[in-house]
Amino acid sequence: MTFSRRGLMSRLTRTVLALAAVGTLGVAGAQTPKTIKLMVGFPPGGGTDAIARILAERLKDELGTPVIVENKPGAGGQIAAQALKAAPADGSTYFLSHDHTITILPMVTKNAGFTPATDFMPVAGFATFVNAFAVSGGTPAKSFNEYVSWVRNQGGGKGSVGVPAPASTPEFLVKVIGEKYKLDLVAAPYRGSAPMMADMLGNQIAAGVASVPDFIENHKAGKLRVVGVLGDKRQAAMPDVPTFAELGLAGFEDVPYYGIFAPAGTPKATVDQFSAAVAKAIAVPEVRDRLTAMGLTVGYMNPQQLAARENAYAQVWARIIKNSGFQPQ
């Protein structure tokens, strides 16, 4: 059997085109959208917003497409989480969040409007952090014990402490501190750390609890003073500040996390591609240094590791919340 030269070339051309088409289809599942939206559940100017913008700036280079930070503040990130649930599962929308929205909110809210285990897909974890107790510049206390004495002597044992969101880990910390030191401390919830910080800088509230990334710049500038941190060790960014375990308040050693999540149903290839981009982004020395300077302990977690971290953290806080007697609102 013989083939003409023209017939052979025609067959080869068709074969090459067919293989190219198959290759294109194979990549299509992981193609990057023209623009990626990285949602944040808190206002501009807070720690989470700043972290998202640092990552977005590098992720656009790793993915070769614009990554836009979109703030959807309100209800401790609940509004943003509900928006993620409703978003298309095509790799165009992600949610950068910490433990409060993903782990705590579903435990303390009767109807959060989302169930992380079924509505979201873990994409990548990139850091852990600790919460801290700080006093405003106008509060005459240089240490946590001095703050306790000041509340007893000047406030008659009563005081208000700002927290970035209601029914949050900072609010539970305020409750535990009040019980341990026999103070009547009331948690004053804000819509994020940025407005709380504004009131602290204006001496409208004497103290606040938030993450180290929320406090660190103003702490370094001497505009407020962090007097205690959670976690099992002192923070490298503020080594002179004692842990609450050192101060005699144990049980808060497990540290919260930062992670990125996608809507359920997002193709695995797309999730893996974005996760790999996060790993590369935080490996860049400039990015790692900027995040570390904000008080984060930077470290990559793949989707499975992030899911395991969230599950372990949830077990710890389920016990703390139950023991506090708190009832879902």
Image (spheres, grey):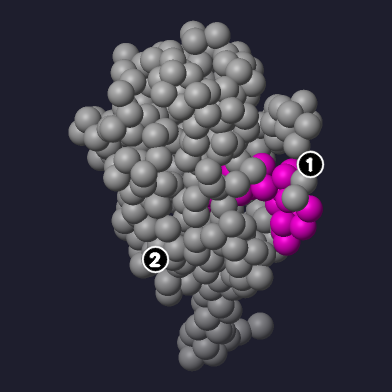
Q: Amino acid at mark 1?
A: Gln
Q: CA distance from mark 1 to mark 2?
A: 37 Å
Left/right placement of residue 98 relative to residue 304 reads: left
User: Percent x, y for residue 4?
Assistant: 53, 89
> Which numbered tag is attached to residue 68?
2
Q: Does the rendering let one see residue 67?
A: yes
| Label 1 CA crowd tier, 10 Å (few <14, some 14–19, many 20+) | few
Residue 192 falls within the magenta-colored stretch: no
Say if 276 sits above or below 314 in the image.
below
Q: Amino acid at mark 2?
A: Ile
Residue drawn at point x = 57 percent, y = 16 percent: 181
- Between 248 and 187, the one lying in front of the other is 187
Residue drawn at point x = 44 percent, y = 65 percent: 70
Which contiguous range is marked in magenta? 96-116
User: Percent x, y for residue 125?
Assistant: 53, 41
Say if 303 sits above or below 24 in the image.
above
> Which numbered tag is attached to residue 229?
none
Q: How many marks?
A: 2
What secondary structure is marked by label 1?
loop
> Which numbered tag is attached to residue 327?
1
